[in-house]
Amino acid sequence: MSDRIRSWIDRHRLITFVAIAYAFTWTIQGTLAYSGMEASWTHSILIGLGGFGPPIGAATVVWASGGSLGTWIGQMFKWRIGAKWWALALGLPLLILVLGVALFVVAGGPIDLTGLESPLIYLFAMAWGTVWGGGQEDLGWRGFMLPILQDSYSALTSSVIVGVTWAAWHLPLFLNATTTHGGWPRSQQLLWMVSILAGSILWTWMYNSTGGSVLAVAVFHAGVNSMGIYHPADPDALVPNGVPDPWLNLLAEVTGAIPLVLIAVVLVVVYGPGRLANREPPTPQDAGLPPDAESTAAE
């Protein structure tokens, strides 16, 4: 790569990061959507491979800017954050599930407690989700994009910008009939957008509060994603005779989104929109970028 190109990337970090993240992911996942490939382990692995667009985009920009790839990727191995934060990263997904199920039952949703999965399935889903099924994205969204944005904007504004960019990045999944996203009606897609914006605030809170532990965020992210396995909504009622019941599925989505939104609101009120933490947020230098490079967050 020529010095001229590297200099351009250094001056346009966010634009370059988003462009590479989208190009990598949309090429792989868009091809899968167009190919009509049936759902399978191979399909799932390829979808996960497409999810590496954000870390690839971040790594490219850190390298081109003359930064430290070791410092950037080291955020994924930052595990010394204290027992309190590990308890929250592992326990909050369970609280979100319990609140969502309680709301679902109160609203009249039918449940079936006889078919709950083994805890071993949860451990597998957590491990898979942390390194391949979603958590790997956080090295880009939280471990790179967020610190650059927070250098110019509040934590809340930065969370919203990351959340919108992150949500739109999922577009190929909505175009693929074999993915969960592809089978959702418009109302469910809108609710998912609300959930992902709320989730973006939660992940910012975790990232800032742990001094930049992408590992904690990835585990937290994987935990929230994995909780759906244990939602006891009666599958025979949700999909009677193989046809999804629109009302019950919408109810499940609404009651699942409400706890995320409520927790996000509480975090903003308690910690304030400026930092969403009781400490200074990580800087671009904590993400491996050189201290004298020009920030482009306000471009």
Image (cartoon, helix red, strand yellow):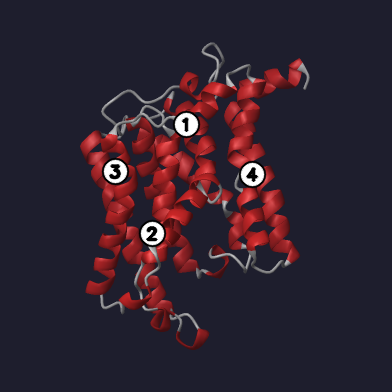
Q: For mark 1, give the secondary structure.
A: helix
Confirm whether residue 47 shows in the render: yes
Q: Are marks 4 and 3 in contact (CB under 8 Å)?
A: no
Q: CA distance from mark 1 to mark 4?
A: 25 Å
Q: Are marks 2 and 4 in contact (CB under 8 Å)?
A: no
Question: Given this view, does label 1 or label 4 mark the residue nearer the observer?
Answer: 1
Label 3 is placed on what type of residue? Leu
| Residue 256 in the figure: left or right of residue 187 | left
Residue 133 is situated, as x and y percent measured from the top left of the image, at 54, 51
Q: Are marks 3 and 2 in contact (CB under 8 Å)?
A: no
Q: Residue at x 52, y 49 (%)?
A: 134
Counting other residues with Cα less than 10 Å from the Cα at mark 2, is it few (<14), some (14-19), or many (20 or more)? some
Label 4 is placed on what type of residue? Tyr
Q: Nearer the viewer, residue 227 or 19?
A: 227
Q: Is residue 88 above or below residue 17?
A: below
Label 1 is placed on what type of residue? Phe
Q: Residue at x 39, y 34 (%)?
A: 207
Q: For mark 3, give the secondary structure.
A: helix
In the picture of the structure, the residue carrying the numbered disc 3 is 88
Residue 285 is situated, as x and y percent measured from the top left of the image, at 49, 18
Q: Is residue 292 above or below residue 295?
A: above
